[in-house]
């Protein structure tokens, strides 16, 4: 890249950033209304989008990442940069050939019979070409753009300068945005996409995850031909998953495809491990027989074992109303800005746990979304990129579900998939359900009954006869209540077992129900006998 092009590129980025800050201060000085500020951010968004398209390179990726940070950036700005398409004209074939020669050498090059010189896809980081190997296999070759490393260096230098500038002069509350953290996260994400070796490893993990799934496929990777700048994978003929004409043409069911798609993502979202963070229709394809094909694992998110444990602690804290524990988990997950006391989060978590979700469901979707966003914006939080990716992944898949099955509510698609995931659960998930039950009023009532049952023993030890007799009465009443609660509990267990189609639960439910019913009858008979004796003064 020529020196004057480098300078021009850096100047375009820096001048845009500086002009944004100047206009923000000018509007603040003029005391413009919120509506006028919103319009300003809309205009800034349009300018930002224009510059991104003009410069291309990784800045398109930066724009895509910024478009999902609704927790940090104004809504009118987000609205203008949403839907940025990473589509860039392909490089000259001669330059692509040069990259292949450098990466393969003559030995690996001899394994390839022919390569079609016209790119089938071209984006800011890589281009894809169709090729035939010596053994006749048809493959897709993803090649890193020849000048991308230089573009990355220039663009990140410019962004680094902008972030430092914004940190000290941007007219926003101190600590509201951790610019250093934001810059680091964006850089890590894009550098990971530049490493095709990392993408290969991610693809192989997904291959192992779905190798026993009949209708979900991940292309085979040709490791011997793949390098840090070249990725070779199996060519699969398929169409975009939301191509309704193709789906109807081959007699496929949009409802079945949406169900299969969701089930393929549930384990990614809910368990420790990596998940596909960019599942748009270009990366999720459908074959003639309804098989779902997943492509492009350059942008992945990860839920670590530690994150999974902290998520459970967060849920347990909310379910058990231990908001201090929940706030602590919230902090360790990285949601709180530096210097924020976790105690500040406790009232909000309490409000969230006691929110009237039925009323929320009856609200207009946009009003409900605005209410939740306003609540989040008022907090000293910054959503870590790895969790933003989780939200992006879910929102993108949700959009595909709605296009495939527009007559069905998302929640109605989610329920059966969630129960199926629950049926394949490990002990951690069942443990969470047990802890949820322990937080319910019926369980707390049972705990009180157990305390009453233990009270007579303490009374005997204290030789308090009168208290013992009083407690004896309470014991019988408590036994009856305990048995009745047991009847209700095991009836519920029985119903859950039938819903989940779990044989062991379906056996435990009715068995416990019968035992508790017999216990209730037996205790009632003993209580009547004891009461008659007590009335006649025959009990010491």
Image: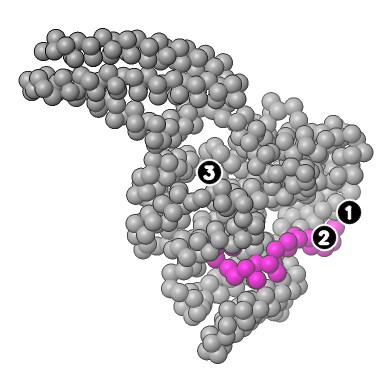
CB under 8 Å between callouts 2 and 1?
Answer: yes
Q: Which residue is mark 2?
A: 90
Q: For the residues carrying marks 3 and 1, which lies nearer the camera in this image? A: 3
Q: Residue 287, image x and y in percent? A: 84, 36
Mark 2 or mark 1, which has the lower sequence index? 2
Give the label on residue 230, or none: none
Q: Position of residue 7 (x, y in %)?
A: 67, 79
In this picture, which residue range is highlighted in magenta?
68-93
Going from the N terminus, do you reach mark 2 or mark 3 first? Answer: 2
Which residue is outermost to the front?
A: 536
Q: Tag 3: Cα neighbours inside 10 Å, few (<14), some, or many (≥20)?
A: many
The residue nearer to you, when weighing 257 against 154, is 257
Q: Is residue 138 above or below residue 520?
A: below
Where residue 193 appears, x then y in whole percent? 65, 53
**Residue at the spot 65% in from the left edge and 42% down from the top edge:** 411
Q: Which mark is residue 118?
A: 1
- Quarter of the picture containing the C terminus is top left
Q: Residue at x 53, y 38 (%)?
A: 272
- Label number found at residue 303: 3
Q: Position of residue 211 (x, y in %)?
A: 69, 28
Q: Is residue 301 visible?
A: yes
Give the Cα distance between marks 3 and 1.
38 Å
Classed neighbour count for the residue bearing mark 1: other residues with Cα under 10 Å, few (<14), some (14–19), many (≥20): some
Quarter of the image for residue 418 reads: top right
Is residue 77 part of the magenta span, yes or no?
yes
Please tell me how crowded label 2 is: few (under 14), some (14-19), or many (20+) other residues with Cα within 10 Å: some
The answer to which of marks 3 and 1 sits earlier in the sequence is 1
Q: Does dot 3 land on a helix, a strand or a loop? A: strand
| Numbered-mark total | 3
Could you tell me which residue is drawn at 61 percent across and 43 percent down?
Answer: 275
């Amino acid at each position: 890249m020529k020196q004057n092009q480098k300078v021009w590129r850096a100047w375009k980025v820096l001048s845009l950033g500086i002009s944004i800050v100047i206009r923000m201060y000018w509007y603040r000085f003029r005391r413009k209304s919120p509506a006028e500020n919103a319009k300003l951010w809309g205009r800034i968004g349009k300018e930002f989008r224009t510059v991104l398209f003009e410069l291309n390179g990784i800045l398109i990726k930066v724009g895509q990442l910024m478009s999902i940070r609704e927790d940090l950036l104004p809504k009118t700005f987000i609205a203008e940069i949403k839907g940025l398409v990473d589509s860039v004209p392909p490089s000259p074939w001669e330059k692509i050939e040069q990259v292949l020669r450098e990466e393969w050498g003559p030995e690996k090059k001899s394994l390839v019979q022919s390569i079609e010189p016209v790119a089938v896809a071209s984006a800011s980081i890589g281009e894809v070409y169709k090729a035939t190997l010596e053994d006749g296999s048809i493959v897709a070759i993803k090649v890193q753009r020849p000048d991308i490393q230089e573009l990355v260096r220039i663009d990140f230098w410019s962004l680094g300068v902008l972030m430092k500038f914004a940190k000290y002069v941007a007219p926003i509350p101190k600590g509201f945005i951790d610019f250093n953290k934001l810059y680091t996260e964006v850089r890590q994400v894009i550098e990971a996409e530049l490493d095709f070796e990392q993408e290969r490893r991610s693809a192989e993990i997904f291959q192992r995850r779905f190798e026993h799934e009949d209708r979900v496929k991940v292309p085979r990777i040709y490791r011997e031909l793949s390098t840090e700048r070249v990725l070779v994978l199996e060519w699969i003929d398929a169409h975009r998953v939301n191509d309704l004409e193709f789906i109807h043409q081959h007699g496929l069911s949009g409802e079945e495809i949406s169900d299969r798609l969701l089930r393929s993502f549930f384990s990614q979202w809910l368990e420790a491990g990596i998940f596909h963070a960019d599942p748009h229709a270009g990366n999720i394809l459908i074959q003639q027989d309804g098989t779902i094909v997943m492509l492009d694992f350059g942008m992945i998110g990860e839920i670590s074992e530690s994150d999974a444990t902290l998520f459970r602690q967060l849920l347990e804290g909310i379910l058990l109303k231990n908001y201090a524990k929940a706030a602590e988990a919230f902090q360790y997950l990285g949601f709180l800005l530096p210097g924020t006391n976790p105690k500040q989060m406790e009232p909000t978590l309490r409000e969230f746990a006691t929110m009237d979700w039925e009323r929320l469901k009856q609200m207009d979707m946009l009003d409900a979304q605005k209410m939740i966003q306003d609540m989040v914006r008022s907090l000293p939080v910054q959503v870590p990129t790895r969790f933003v990716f989780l939200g992006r992944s879910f929102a993108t898949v949700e959009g595909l579900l709605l296009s495939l099955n527009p007559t069905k509510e998302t929640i109605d698609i989610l329920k059966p998939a969630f129960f199926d995931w629950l049926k394949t659960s490990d002990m951690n998930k069942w443990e969470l359900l047990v802890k949820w039950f322990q937080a319910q009023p019926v369980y707390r009532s049972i705990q009180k009954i157990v305390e009453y049952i233990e009270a007579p023993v303490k009374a005997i030890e204290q030789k308090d006869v009168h208290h013992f007799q009083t407690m004896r009465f309470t014991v019988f009443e408590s036994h009856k209540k305990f048995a009745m609660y047991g009847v209700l509990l095991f009836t519920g267990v029985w119903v859950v077992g039938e819903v989940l189609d779990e044989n062991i639960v379906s056996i435990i439910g009715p068995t416990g129900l019968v035992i508790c019913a017999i216990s209730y009858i037996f205790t009632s008979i003993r209580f009547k006998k004891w009461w008659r004796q007590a009335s006649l003064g025959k009990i010491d």
